[in-house]
Image (tube, helix red, strand yellow):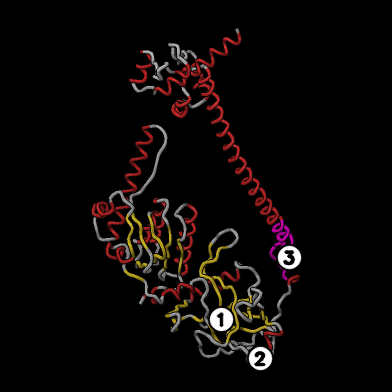
Amino acid sequence: MLLDFLNNRNVFLFDFIYDETTEKLIEEMLELNSISKEPINLIINSPGGVVTSAFAIIDIMEAIESPVNTIVLGDAMSASVIIASSGAKRYISKNSQFMVHEASGGSYGKVSQNRDTNENHEYLNDKMFEILGRTTNKTAQQVKDAIGSRDVYMTAQEAIDFGLVDGILDTDVIETLKLSESIGYEMAVNLDTKGNTFSDVPLLQAGTHNSDKYGKIEITIDMLEAFKANFEANVIGTDVSIDLTHENDDGEKPAVGWVKGLDIIDGVLSAKVKFNEKGQKLIAEEAFKYASAEYVNIYRDSAGKPHSYVLKGATLTNRPVIKNKPIKLSEKHGKENIMNEKELIAMLKAKAGIDVTALQASVGQLVALQNTNTTLTAQVEALKADSEELKALKVANSVKAMDDAFESVVAELKEYPVRKSLVVAMYKTPEELIAAYKDMPAVVAKAPIGENGKTTNGGVVLTEEEKSLVTSGQFTEKDVLLARQFERVIAADEDTED
């Protein structure tokens, strides 16, 4: 059953495939592989991207010892198709789809350079079809012939029939996927009989646990050790709490205790918890008997580095998903001296040379720099917007300049107004247009015309030259008459000046 294979070792490709997403995905797979050799689930919803980056992801999938299963939720398009089809086990949800096509690319530069680039594009395209041929039990040529030069879309069933995936996900898998970020494991917790504020609280136990709701849940010793190591490395910070509820009406988690340390005893991850007065009372009166651990499979710190299995905290509960026998808490930590914040800061400076106060000041400076960077980024975006406005204004001014240049040519009777769009399209600048017409004679009628350009009987009189222009299709009679009108206006102006 799919629930047996779909555990909590999930990584996600929900973006374009480029350098940054590839780097993060490879880091996460390598990190999970270092923790355990159990299968990793790569969940895909991607429009594709850089095909060489996809090749890199596939190389890591095949190189690590952990089998990498692929699950398509939504779209697997372009370069993400070859990743989805390269999984150890390959699944697709019933409403998802594939889109397969040839590799695409472009080049710019010298002919010789373009030739080399195009040859590389051919190589990448052949490599892509070679992978698809291997994963679909076809030859590369068979896949090429099936795809051709089109964008080929496939439904979930069509992708199965083509050999890109093995099957469709069961409907109950969706519930498990929702738990990929935080899965609760509940075990018994009791405050020690002496009422001390420091107690051991069991959170997770190694082994295989079965649940009607979540299916099979696997907790390994390697996972427990990763939780402990990440807690001690302060990966998530110092505020790891035991909360009364998952969330209250104000979106806050009211803490009843704080985790001060983690131990692994007989396959159980146990937290050293300092309960506040409210927490002591709730547990002593058995209002709550269990704690539900909350953790993330992959946590990225402020530097973007991934960490596998990081404890976020726990929540008190009386309805555990997995209810093991109550575990009696050890009293050996009941009177242990817990340093306060000032003592801890002093100890770190004296024994490790770590100046926490100076580090806090540096953090403040970094926050200020980040705020400054945000402000500068906003200013850059504003400048970009202004630049776009200037470009638009420049285009408008250029259009007006071309219009003015053409009007000056018309005024010299060297062109007809009706030819404006044709003439303007022939030249890049107003200067080119004016230069082209500089030595051109005026296009005017040489024969006299009567009133309104017609003979006494109303017919249009055209010279032989004008008839030739009309017959050849260069101008219409209307064009010729317009030219005559301009000639008459110019002649009238010259008589006035005389």
Up the image or down, 263 lies above or below 237; here it is: below
Q: Nearer the viewer, residue 69 or 418?
A: 418
Q: Which quadrant of the figure has residue 246? A: bottom right
Q: Which residue is mark 3?
A: 350
Q: Which residue is mark 2?
A: 284
Q: Is residue 319 magenta?
A: no
The answer to which of marks 2 and 3 sits earlier in the sequence is 2
Q: Which mark is residue 491?
A: none
Measured from the top left, where is residue 399 in percent x and y?
Answer: 54, 31
How far apart are labels 2 and 3 at the CA level? 39 Å
Q: Amino acid at mark 2?
A: Ala
The answer to which of marks 3 and 1 sits earlier in the sequence is 1
Q: Considering the numbered disc 1 on the image, is that residue within a helix, a strand or a loop?
A: strand
| Residue 260 at least partly seen | no
Q: Which mark is residue 292?
A: 1
Screen quadrant of the C terminus: top right
How would you rate the neighbour count of disc 1 (Cα within 10 Å): few for under 14, some for 14-19, many for 20 or more?
A: many
Which contiguous range is marked in magenta? 344-364
The residue at 51%/71% (across/down) is: 181
